[in-house]
Amino acid sequence: MNRVMKRNKINSDRSWIFPVTGVVLALYSLLLVLFFIWALLSSFKANLDFSNNLFGWPRKWMFSNYRVAFENFFIQVQEKGHLRNVYMGEMFLNSILYTVGSSFAATVIPCIVGYLTAKFPYRFSRWLINITIICLIIPIIGSLPSQLQISKTMGLYDQLWGMWIMKANFMSMYLLIFNSAFKAIPDAYSEAARIDGASETKVLLSIALPLVRSLFFTIMLIQAIGFWNDYQTPMLFMPDRPTVAYGLYVFNQGTITQLNTVPFKLTAALEMMAPILIIFILFNKKIIGNVTMGGLKQ
Amino acid sequence: MKEKIAQTSRKISDSIGWFFYSFGNLLHRPFAQRKPSRMNEKTKRLVFYILLMAYPVVQFLIFYIVVNANSLLLAFESYDRSANRYLFVGWANFENFATLFQSDSTFRDSLKNSALVWLIGLASIPLNLVFSFYIYKKKPVSGFFKVMLFLPSIVPSIALVVIYLFFVERAVPSLLGSLTGNSHIEGLLTNSSTLFGTLVFFNIAFGFGSGMLLFLGAMNQVSPEVIEAAHLDGATGLRELVSIILPNIYGTISSFLVLGVAGIFAEQYCLYSFFGNAADPRYITVGYYLFTQTASASLAEYPKIAAIGLALTLIAAPLTFLAKGLLQRVDPLEDKR
Amino acid sequence: MGKMKKTIELALLSTVLASCGGLSTSSASGSGSGSTAPGDLSTLYVSNFNGGFGDSWLKKAISRFEKDNQNVSFESGKKGVHIEIQDNKTDAITLESTLKDSLSDVFFAEGLYYYDYIAQNLLLDVSDIVEEKLTGYGETRSIADKMTSEQRSFYQTTDGKYYGIPHYSGFSGLIYDVDLFDEDNLYFADGSSSFITSSSDKKSAGPDGISGTLDDGLPSTYDQFFQLCSHMAGDLGITPLIWNGQYSNTYLENLIYALMGDYEGLGNMMMNYTFSGISKNIINPVNSDGEYTFADSARGVQIQPNNAYELYANAGRYEALNFLKKLVSKSDYYYNLSFSPSFLHTEAQLAYLESRPKGQPIAMLSDGCWWEEEADANIQQIADFYGEQYSRMNRHFGWMPLPKANQGKVGQKPTLVDTLNSLGFIKANATPSKIPLAKKFLQYVSTDESLREFTTTTNTLKALDYKLTNEDLAKLSPFGATIYEAKCSSDMVYPYSNVPMYIDNVSYFNMYESFASSVGGTLQKRPIQYFRANQANSAADYFNGMRTYRESVWSNTFSEYFVNA
């Protein structure tokens, strides 16, 4: 790098905006850390200890809070004439199935439609892209009653697979992203495969999809985060298949005296966060490292 | 350690690729052994296209067109309890909407609050951009800050709400009480003068993640040559951000803004998570209002909610198009696209 | 080191994944696990809404019933009974759609609309056990005889059948710390507007206007009540009141209703559900000074379906609203977390219980009569921490007879309002072979012995008529004794009727829907939120708007029930 460029880069690096932003971010991070530390310490307190000692160390470390919260973190559902309790383990399973299934469905459909619209230049492909853009920017409000009605009519209500079907649509900005990604792949790859006798299916599955797997994985992860956090959709559409997010919401509203305390509610919240935090710590570079999505100015 | 994690990640994505490849081979094998088809290549491609498009199009027709058409129809219907079905009643539900707008200050307040919330979100975008820029430039501790900014997005929002609720209602008043000697300080969500600000802080402070992801991704796409050229011309950090980075990621920013306008009436602002059905009506948004109405609605009430939704769509849609048009007009690199 | 880190990471990840898949345990709740008794016993499943009243009363009743019937055959080839409880917190709306498929045959639930359930053929006809004299249990009365006339006219349908039995009685009001009142002389002195200075001073007569009764010294009027609150907060550093913040609207509306009921009395209150009678409590719009005149105090207003909206302008309603307006307008009168959405209702009970041992006393709690049973675990916690003198049997809490709106009302018989709509019933599609057993059990829990045991166990009341023996009274906690005393000395309003206009529109007349008001052209639904939104918002404006609103919608909603002039 020549002297001028080096000097200019140094000037750029010395800009006041960076130290100021750094300080703001440091304060933000500190606040977040203190926030979680307070919650963690409070979760180890007995109820009387918490109400009299909001900031100190627990007078007696109540590790049993975690076990008790885990055992009592349940929602009652109706199944085959029985009322039965769904505990945290099953809720995690429901969450994983709901998250993985819905995010896969919500990613694979835009991916396939993105491929079709990019590589099959029929008029219908152009219409589909234009319709998508229009529908994305036209907000439909108040369609929830209608959605509920239709899901009940079609027998999708209160079923995990029903949610997957409902989420398997291309109406999202990810269609446009996949469309751009597939357009950027030279046709030469698929032409060469066709010359060798490959069918369209083989071209899709063996040539096109593997080339976008990184993007696929990233989008699926981003979608999965949204589905994992969502408690309102499971609450409305599958009340007998409670997810962890819904479970925590109900736990928070619950009224069993021994559990209706602040330490227990904090414990339940932290228990719920733990698995996703662990996964994030292990894979954070993958999750937030290779995002290459751009804008959608079309 | 880093290499090992990268290796693991590569293995996972290879597995996904391998899965598709094997699945493709599995599907292909029966066809490979068949006699050559009489269909020509064009027809084969068309059949393939139709077969693969079938499900997505049908799904779109049912869960978008039919749902919204049903919602549209519901807006013009009324529930007949004795016959147990919906009957067409014309514009009656919209008259109810007009009455609601005139008589229900809660609904009017919710419209105002939705607009306010959107404006506040708009005002927070520069902050998000600056944070993203800091991380893009790989400034000191940027890796750690990236994780901290993204962390609230990764954990379930309901868990964050629970912790935040108790923090601002118990910890903060207690702290302030110790500092001021006043033991009667109300929680930040109880005190009506701090309630809205506390909600805003939660939504902004814990909402950087998804925006940061998009902006960072877009910044990474800016050509390094352009950056170098800017440095050659003496662009400082802020100048580089304003004159080079922002124009080049304008597409992402404008998409973000357009989608924000489109979602103006859908935003609940986590009110339901904090308050359930009992949020202070002076501070609710339209999104919250509609959600709580729907969650507790009987069959008879669905049409009224659908009518409100349709009326709001008719307001939001032109606003969205207007926003898109305006943003396109001020695109700094419009000539160069 | 790298290898160890990887091992730790993999172990953590495995633990996370294992916890997701491997630890899902699900079982039926409560003591009922779905298991059946040994094959020679008849099994009955009982669903119990396990809320504030708990299930210890039910366990005791089951234990006695099983013992009393160990040689009785209810099904061929079987002798004896085994009963399983299915505890739950299923709300009435969900129960409506799930009870047909439930394992349970007998149900104890609350908050349900009796006639809606009947219309959907969900309830079994139990007229035989309700009308049968309980001579087999040494009694001369039937269950029907233990109901009030209002209850009988409601629970007995027009074809003369009963489909359920009233379960527990749930009314709201104020609980006060008797020990604190005694220690700090928080009683009004006889013949004076000030407080006693020592325990030997003669106390005022209290709300019942009779000296020598349990309510001596307690505030007789609303004015005295607020005088007491000011004295506590201003002079003694005592927080007068506490209620839970999470459901503050609901709990305070319960209190408004309780005050209104106490003012109106049984006869006037019932008009709100029967839409007939003569009301002498209807008032003209209240002016900005809070003054009003009665609409027709001499003859009263003839109420019928056509004009029942006038009842939304009764004086008791205004006085109750005004009471609450005053209460919530001064932050010194209530605990600082009482409007915090983070302040859970059981926490409010705990804070109340801990306040005196901690040296930061809170005098009164606004809650339901079930609060002590609901707070049982918390009471024990306090006793464990601070000493046995704070145990349930040693602490003295009392059910506070509500003060009267004005001096003219002092001495009027107190009226309580039961708002929980709880019911014991058998589902219509119960297994035929189980029906005799189910009926016998449902009848059993309504015998005098079971009713008394319910009260001595929970220190709350069943919604039937029965008397406790001296032995029973000795088993009650001090609070329980005041609850029983309140029942004996008060009228009880059961807020329902069999009038078609009421039955067809039960949810419309639900207590929590009764507060809608048109204020300045704007629809308000929660009076407490309205009062807190602005100090200038008055009870008069809110009250005046209630009648205005009802009148505007009444004709459209109820014209089919109007009587011709």
Image (tube, coloured by chain):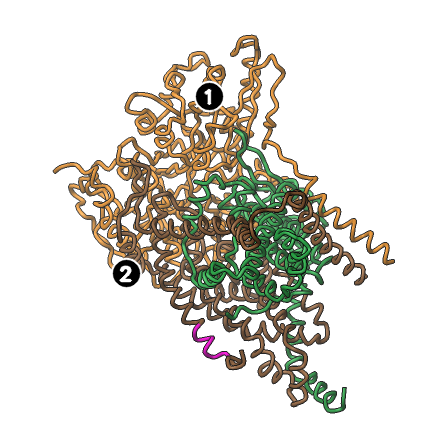
Chain colours: A green, B brown, C orange
- Position of residue C11 measured from the top left corner of the image (x, y, whole percent): 79, 49
Residue A65 visible in rendering: no
Neighbour class for label 1 at 10 Å: few (<14), some, many (≥20)? many
Q: Nearer the viewer, residue A84 or B300?
A: B300
Neighbour class for label 2 at 10 Å: few (<14), some, many (≥20)? few
Q: Find disc 2 in the rendering and name its residue.
A: C520
Q: The disc labelled 1 sits on which kind of residue?
A: Ala
Q: Find disc 1 in the rendering and name its residue.
A: C430
Looking at the image, residue A159 sits to the left or right of residue C116; the answer is right
The disc label shown at residue C205, or none: none
The quadrant where residue C466 appears = top left
Q: CA distance from mark 2 to mark 1?
A: 53 Å
Pointer 2 with pointer 1, Cβ within 8 A = no
Over which residues does the magenta segment extend?
B325-331
Q: Nearer the viewer, residue B92 or C367?
A: B92
Q: Is residue C32 above or below residue A158?
A: above
- Tally the numbered discs: 2
Q: Nearer the viewer, residue A79 or A69?
A: A79
Measuring 64% from the left and 59% from the top, which residue is drawn there? Answer: A190
The quadrant where residue B201 appears = bottom right
- Position of residue A257 measured from the top left corner of the image (x, y, whole percent): 57, 42
Looking at the image, the residue that sits furthest to the left is C565
Chain of the residue under label 2: C
Residue B1 visible in rendering: yes
User: Looking at the figure, which quarter contains the C terminus of chain C?
Assistant: top left
Looking at the image, the residue that sits furthest to the top is C77
Q: The disc labelled 2 sits on which kind of residue?
A: Gly
Residue C354 forms part of the magenta stretch: no
